[in-house]
Image (tube, rainbow, N blue to C red):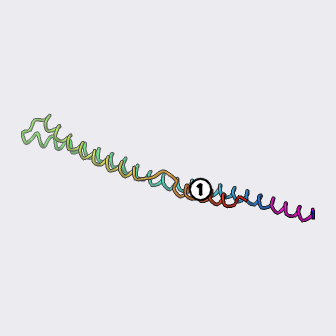
Amino acid sequence: MSEVRTQQERSIGELFGQLAEDMSLLVRQEVQLAKTEMSEKMSRATGDLVAVGTGGFVAYLGGLALVAALILGLAELGIASWLSALIVGAVLAGVGFVMLRRGTRDLKQHSFTPDRTIRTLKEDVQWAKEQRP
């Protein structure tokens, strides 16, 4: 009789050991999933940030050249130089504002929450609750 109980206790111990190993593996897999998911999201956001920065810089360089040409062109038409500069500056500022606004809007669309990881963690918690005796 004691031999049966010892074998049964050992089986329960083995089951708990296996459960602990499974939970440990599950946690490691969830951590890896979170790392992978965050890496993907940061990659996409980095590309958008580079596009915003590059677009801003190119617009700035083009704006510098156009500013000089437009101011001189308006001055040739008889408009005062200061008024020519004001008109050109206002137009360029408006264009730049639109570009920056679009870039920041696109950045806001990115979610930096590891959604898949959170979902699977919830499923894992539910599974672990179901495994308890």
On the rendered structure, is 6 left or right of 105?
Answer: right
Residue 9 magenta-highlighted? yes
- Range of the magenta residues? 2-13
Find the residue positioned furthest to the top: 82
So how many labels did they put on this image? 1
Q: Which quadrant is the N terminus positioned in?
A: bottom right
Residue 47 is left or right of residue 133, and the answer is left
Residue 65 at what x, y percent from top left? Answer: 23, 44
Q: Quadrant of residue 24?
A: bottom right
> What secondary structure is the stretch in magenta mostly built from?
helix
Magenta span contains residue 125? no
Please tell me whether residue 77 is drawn above or below residue 19 in the rendered image: above
Residue visible at 16% across and 40% down in the picture:
87
Q: Is residue 11 left or right of residue 91?
A: right
| Residue occupying the point 25% across, 47% down | 95
Q: Position of residue 13 (x, y in %)?
A: 81, 58
The kind of residue on which mark 1 rests is Leu
Describe the element under mark 1 as helix, strand or loop: helix
Measuring from the top left, give residue 131's x and y in whole percent.
Answer: 69, 61
The residue under label 1 is 121
Q: Residue at coordinates 59% horizontally, 59% vertically from top-left? A: 123
Residue at (66% x, 61% y) in the render: 130
Q: Position of residue 90 (x, y in %)?
A: 20, 41
In depth, the one of 130 and 24 nearer the eye is 130
Which of these two is toward me, 23 or 108?
23
Tell me which corner region of the image, top left, top right, bottom left or bottom right, holds residue 118: bottom right
